[in-house]
């Protein structure tokens, strides 16, 4: 019975992880779109600042003095920070292959992009080599996850003299 349970858990892990390569591909595509959009906003801000003889930092400092200007300054600082994070993550994710991305979940940190990707994602049968490898890794992880409690219980059972 435990073997059947282990197999069921392992198959669930396999099915779930087999979807990660396709999901991460879609996330990377969306993140690229976010970087493009944020880059346009940053470029327009920088061009406006340059047209008035200011640097980005000077223009941001100039955005203060009223509730609206303070809010806009905060929004622009958030845009620049998000753009820097997204560019960094996108570069790492593009360099990594689909299976390597499984080791980079911390690079899928843009909450807005992650939520949008998850909202549109539809699982599919793993027909790519990466999908099949991910399924195999998931199967092994699921099998191991269900084996660990049994190993500990068996050791306790043996130590207590239960057989």
Image (cartoon, rainbow, N blue to C red):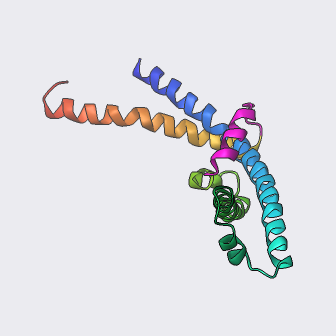
Task: Name the residue at 74% across, 53% down.
Answer: 31
Q: Nearer the viewer, residue 21 or 81?
A: 81
Q: Nearer the viewer, residue 105 or 141?
A: 105
Magenta residues (range)? 109-127
User: Where the C terminus falls, by quadrant?
Assistant: top left
Image position, residue 23 (x, y; %): 71, 42
Task: Name the residue at 72% across, 73% down.
Answer: 59
* Residue 123: in magenta span: yes
> How many numbered discs sit on the rendered protein?
0
Where residue 78 sits, quadrant-wise, is: bottom right
Task: Name the residue at 57% across, 39% down.
Answer: 138
Compared to residue 158, the image places residue 137 above or below, namely below
Image position, residue 116 (x, y; %): 72, 39
Where residue 162 sits, quadrant-wise, is: top left
Left or right of 141 on screen, residue 122 = right
Image position, residue 99 (x, y; %): 65, 51
* Residue 28: in magenta span: no
């Amino acid at each position: 019975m435990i073997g059947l349970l282990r197999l069921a858990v392992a198959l669930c892990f396999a099915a779930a992880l087999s979807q990660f390569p396709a999901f991460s591909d879609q996330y990377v595509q969306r993140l690229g779109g976010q970087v493009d959009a944020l880059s346009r906003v940053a470029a327009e801000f920088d061009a406006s600042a340059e047209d008035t003889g200011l640097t980005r930092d000077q223009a941001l400092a100039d955005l203060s003095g009223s509730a609206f200007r303070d809010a806009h300054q905060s929004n622009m600082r958030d845009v620049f920070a998000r753009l820097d994070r997204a560019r960094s993550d996108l570069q790492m994710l593009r360099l990594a292959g689909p299976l390597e991305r499984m080791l980079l979940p911390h690079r899928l940190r843009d909450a807005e992009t992650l939520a949008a990707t998850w909202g549109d994602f539809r699982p599919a049968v793993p027909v790519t080599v990466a999908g099949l490898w991910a399924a195999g890794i998931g199967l092994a992880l699921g099998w191991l996850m269900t084996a660990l409690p049994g190993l500990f219980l068996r050791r306790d059972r043996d130590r207590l003299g239960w057989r």
